[in-house]
Image: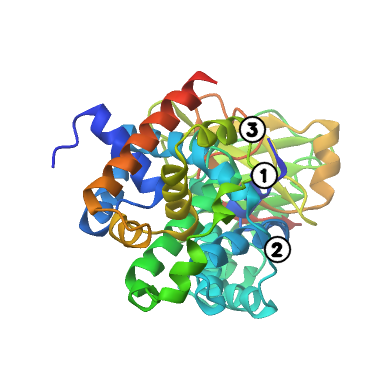
């Protein structure tokens, strides 16, 4: 059992000290992820706050069958951030942001785990970019098709085929 | 859309985790996942595969206000009474039952027939607690005898954990130490448990007990894995 898991077990028993420690250990990573997706301090902080309130009350529902403790907490942050994006994204379609996004920063994912890294690298460049933009920025098919200037149907099949390919590759390694 | 094809479920789970599943389809899939273990399984598969991508995201410090807001949210809501560490609200509800037990125990009046003949001195439990749900439904009286390390758990009513499940008793040491398992609780009647020497030491630093729902035979990990259903503050007599 890792440290986060044992902290969650204590939090399930309403241990405030354990909760504070969990926050200290994990909030910088979780906040970084929320901020990368949302790009606004107020939204990212709100997401982090809601996520930790949920972690406090739902810690007893976490068990190891639900994956690692970090995956469980990350999923709470991630899906909440996606909800926030979807209800606010209209403000987010400026061209400057578009230029900012369609650069090559998505092509270097140095610290990624090796297997995943290898499998992502096997994707064609534009498909790889679509997957990474969707993952890190929370874009929908529609938004991605606009940003990468391809028809919606093409984008949908890029994403679907990329995920299929990733799965085959990840299951092999 | 039908959700009975494992292949379709896998594709939807992939796009759910990636984030490209959106609108009503996303909401519906999320709702279905609550009661569908195949969906949960596929979501977990994709989370485990894709979340390492987060490792490359730069950690950032949120402002101190966020933690303050969280603390205030978990302290002021109706859940406040659940907190061990703010006992006042919680324990008022069970204090009547507890006082009665304490008085009877101090007076050496046994609420049940003793398991073995006890000398007058050792018949007095040094610690006693009533384990109750958060809405004050009392389920067990637990007595701890520090001279012998004996623990008795007396069911106040029949409380069944359900098929393939068990109720497990935990000591909750202060100072952020891990909960320590004491043993499994009886569904009815009374059960005697014995504290090992290391547990006797933990007891000195323990101010509350809790009962969690675990797989039959008890927690496989040595820490509570299921929901905590009953709690009780430890009172020395």
Can residue A166 be seen here? The reply is yes
Between the C-alphas of marks 2 and 1, the distance is 31 Å
Q: Is residue A140 left or right of residue B77?
A: left
Between the C-alphas of marks 2 and 3, the distance is 32 Å
Q: Chain of mark 1?
A: A
Q: Chain of mark 3?
A: A
Q: Chain of mark 2?
A: A
Q: Residue at x 65, y 31 (%)?
A: B192
**Mark 2 closeness class: few <14, some 14–19, many ≥20 residues within 10 Å:** some
Q: Nearer the viewer, residue A3 or A134?
A: A134
Between the C-alphas of marks 1 and 3, the distance is 9 Å
Asked if badges 1 and 3 are on one and the same chain, I answer yes
Residue B207's place in the image compared with B180, above or below, is: below
**Mark 1 closeness class: few <14, some 14–19, many ≥20 residues within 10 Å:** few
Q: Nearer the viewer, residue A30 or A118?
A: A118
User: Residue B100: x and y, percent?
Assistant: 59, 60
Q: Residue at x 37, y 64 (%)?
A: A83
**Mark 3 closeness class: few <14, some 14–19, many ≥20 residues within 10 Å:** few
Q: Residue at x 68, y 36 (%)?
A: B181
Q: Which residue is mark 1?
A: A110
Question: Could you tell which of marks 2 and 3 lies nearer the N-terminus?
Answer: 2
Q: Check the picture and name the quadrant holding the C terminus of chain A.
A: top right
Q: Which residue is mark 2?
A: A20
User: Residue B171: x and y, percent?
Assistant: 70, 45
Asked if badges 2 and 3 are on one and the same chain, I answer yes
Q: Which residue is mark 3?
A: A114
Labelled pair 2, 1 in contact (Cβ < 8 Å):
no
Which of labels 2 and 1 is toward the front?
A: 1
Q: Secondary structure at mark 2?
A: helix
Q: Secondary structure at mark 1?
A: loop
Q: Secondary structure at mark 3?
A: helix
Q: Is residue B88 left or right of residue B189?
A: right
């Amino acid at each position: 059992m890792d440290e986060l898991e044992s902290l969650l077990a204590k939090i399930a028993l309403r241990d405030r000290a354990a909760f504070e420690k969990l926050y200290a250990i994990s909030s910088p990573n979780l906040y970084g992820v929320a901020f990368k997706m949302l790009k606004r301090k107020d939204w990212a902080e709100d997401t982090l706050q809601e996520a930790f309130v949920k972690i406090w009350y739902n810690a007893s529902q976490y068990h190891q069958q639900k994956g690692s403790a970090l995956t469980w907490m990350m999923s709470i942050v991630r899906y909440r951030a996606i909800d926030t994006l979807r209800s606010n994204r209209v403000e987010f379609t400026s061209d400057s942001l578009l230029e900012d996004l369609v650069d090559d920063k998505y092509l270097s994912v140095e610290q990624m785990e090796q297997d995943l890294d290898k499998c992502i690298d096997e994707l064609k460049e534009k498909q790889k970019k679509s997957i990474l933009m969707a993952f890190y920025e929370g874009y929908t098919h529609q938004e991605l098709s606009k940003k990468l200037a391809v028809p919606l149907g093409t984008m949908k099949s890029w994403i679907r085929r990329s995920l299929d390919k990733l799965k085959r590759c990840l299951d092999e390694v | 859309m039908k959700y009975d094809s494992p292949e379709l479920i896998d594709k939807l789970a992939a796009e759910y985790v990636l984030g490209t599943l959106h609108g009503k389809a996303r909401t519906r899939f999320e709702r279905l996942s609550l009661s569908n273990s195949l969906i949960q399984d596929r979501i977990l598969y994709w989370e485990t595969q894709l979340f390492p991508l987060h490792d490359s995201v730069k950690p950032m410090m949120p402002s101190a206000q966020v933690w303050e807001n969280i603390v205030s949210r978990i302290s002021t809501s109706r859940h406040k009474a659940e907190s061990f560490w703010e006992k006042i609200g919680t324990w008022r509800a069970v204090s009547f039952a507890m006082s009665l037990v304490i008085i009877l125990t101090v007076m050496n009046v046994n609420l049940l027939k003793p398991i073995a003949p006890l000398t007058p001195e050792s018949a007095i439990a040094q610690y006693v607690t009533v384990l109750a749900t958060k809405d004050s439904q009392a389920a067990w009286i637990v007595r701890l005898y520090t001279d012998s390390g004996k623990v008795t758990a007396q069911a106040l009513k029949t409380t069944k954990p359900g098929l393939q499940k068990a109720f497990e008793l935990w000591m909750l040491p202060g100072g952020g130490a891990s909960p320590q398992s004491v043993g499994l609780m009886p569904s009815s009647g009374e059960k005697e448990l014995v504290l090992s020497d290391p547990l006797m030491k933990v007891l000195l630093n323990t101010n509350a007990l809790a009962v969690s729902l675990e797989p039959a035979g008890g927690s496989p990990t040595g820490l509570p894995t299921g929901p905590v259903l009953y709690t009780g503050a430890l009172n020395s007599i």
